[in-house]
Image (tube, coloured by chain):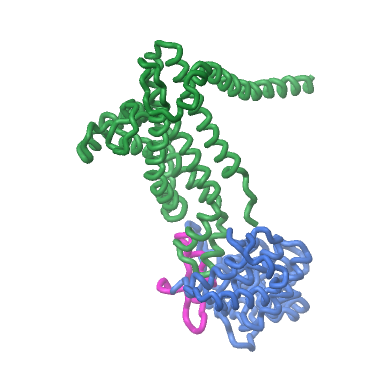
Chain colours: A green, B blue
Amino acid sequence: MNLILDKIFAHTTKFIALGVLLIVAWIFTELFQQSLVSIQSSGFDFVTQTKWAPNLEKFGALPAIYGSVVSTFLAMVLAVPVAIGVAIFLSELAPAKLKSPVGVSIELLAAIPSVIYGMWGLFYFVPIIRDIVGGVGISMLSAGIVLSIMILPFMAAVTRDAMNTTPDILKESAYALGGTKWDVIKDVVMPYAKAGIIGSFILALGRAIGETMAVTFVMGNVHKISLDLTQPATSIPVTLANEFNEADTGIYYSSLFELSLLLLVISFTIISIAKFYFLRRKRLGA
Amino acid sequence: MATITQILEEKALEVKNFEFTYAGADAPSIKKLDMPIAKNSITALIGPSGCGKTTLLRSFNRIHDLYPGNKYEGEILFKDRNILTPKEDLINLRIKIGMIFQKPTAFPMSIYDNVAYGMRLQGIKNKTELEGRVEKALTDAAIWKEVKDRLKHDANGLSGGQQQRLCIARAIAVEPEVLLFDEPTSALDPISTAGIEELVVELKEKVSIIIVTHNMQQAARVSDYTGFMYLGELIELGRTEEMFVTPREKLTEEYITGKFG
């Protein structure tokens, strides 16, 4: 009797697990099918043209791709050094009394829904940016900064966890040779945790590039490539969030689907690199 | 009172009225301990788990200071100077008093960089000097022949025994005067263990050695002096060949004959 129950349980869990695979495949095929009209009519122009004019049936997604790449890049440039600093402080420098309260608040920050970052960004952050750099405030720069603030806690927390895996005995060995705190962080902790740290950056990158709500508020949805970061811009998810309910023609609708397919492929690639290359279980020192 | 044999050699270290209390602990883990350590000899510290032998060993290079709140009292004299004062230069102290750990601790870098690490910390940049001293350290640690063709390889590719000899090479490369071994063979197979023991005996020509071990045979094989510790006190310190044959304290006798452990 128990054996049968075991089997039923095993099969149920297997079925559920396989269901996950099925859903991924389903989403992929659905997006692909819906994109077909656009793929056939626009071809490669879709990713090389800069003009996005649905009323003229011109669909050049380059500004959205550009916006996604630049806002994400900005976010990473701003967030990476701060995240490393916070992680070093928490794992190596902070006194025990500070470690846990600061650590917990960083994890809490990571749990804030992104729509809240977007609202806060629009009402309190954009005006500051406007006062400092001019323009309308709603811009690529605001999007990059809000994104960087959004991914920072996650990055800092995972980087700290990676650094914490460095065995005490390895650090002690470096101190025992006459190393200072800085020597040990630079030569032992960082190299030991390198794979985990880079993995966390790439996961954060994946989150930033797909982020919708936080940037929709502050980016502007303007399909224009501008080198001036204070100008409004758009990104793939911002376009999708803004335009689906306006998509009145089949080709417009299909173009948005192709855009989402593009985003899915980019995100999958990034996450796969992080998972398979950097976040594999690595050999344990000693 | 502990029974302590007079040390005939010059002393490398001298522990006087030493007490050690871990952060947050009510009672000291080491109580009123006096102990001379002979120069260019091997002193083994034995005793049951929790007797304080590793705690004592880790006081000699003040590695306890990495964790806040630990407290030293009394004196440990090194070259007639008490190293327990707050103004002691710990970096300098740890260059003079090196340490080998329970497990091999190769750094995540190449074999060459591992051995050169301590010298680089001291600011030695001259390539010829580094190369010469790396080769000498690896030779002295009896591992040069095995690694000379792969100095640029990741040190973590070496076997456990090789890694432990690499760690010894890394420690002797900075030319310390004292080496502390904290159960250096506890993670190794018998053949690697024999190799490390042989190496330790050879090293005493140049350095004074203190070795903590759980293995009484190991203490008997390698050491010149043996200290038996129990509940944070030194019970007996004597010449190894005498202590294992004719222990003077009843507790020592009971421990080495296996009545408790």
Quarter that holds the N terminus of chain A: top right
Looking at the rendering, which quadrant does residue B88 occupy? bottom left
- In the displayed structure, would residue A215 be above or below residue B186? above
B143 or B243: which is nearer to us? B143
Q: Position of residue A278 (x, y in %)?
A: 57, 44
Rendered residue at 33%/29% (across/down): A224
Is A91 magenta? The answer is no
A190 or A172: which is nearer to us? A190
Residue A113 visible somewhere in the drawing: no
Q: Position of residue A16 (x, y in %)?
A: 64, 21
Is B65 magenta? The answer is yes
- In the displayed structure, would residue A194 be above or below residue A28? below
Question: Could you tell me how many numbered marks the image carries?
Answer: 0
A239 or B195: which is nearer to us? A239
Q: Position of residue A97 (x, y in %)?
A: 41, 50
Quarter that holds the C terminus of chain A: bottom right
- Relative to B216, A280 lies left or right: left
Rendered residue at 28%/33% (across/down): A231
Rendered residue at 47%/73% (across/down): B123
Looking at the rendering, which quadrant does residue A61 occupy? top left
B82 or A271: which is nearer to us? A271
- Relative to B245, B207 lies left or right: left
- In the displayed structure, would residue A139 be above or below residue A197? above
State the extent of the magenta-drawn residues as a range.
B59-88
- Relative to A147, B22 lies left or right: right
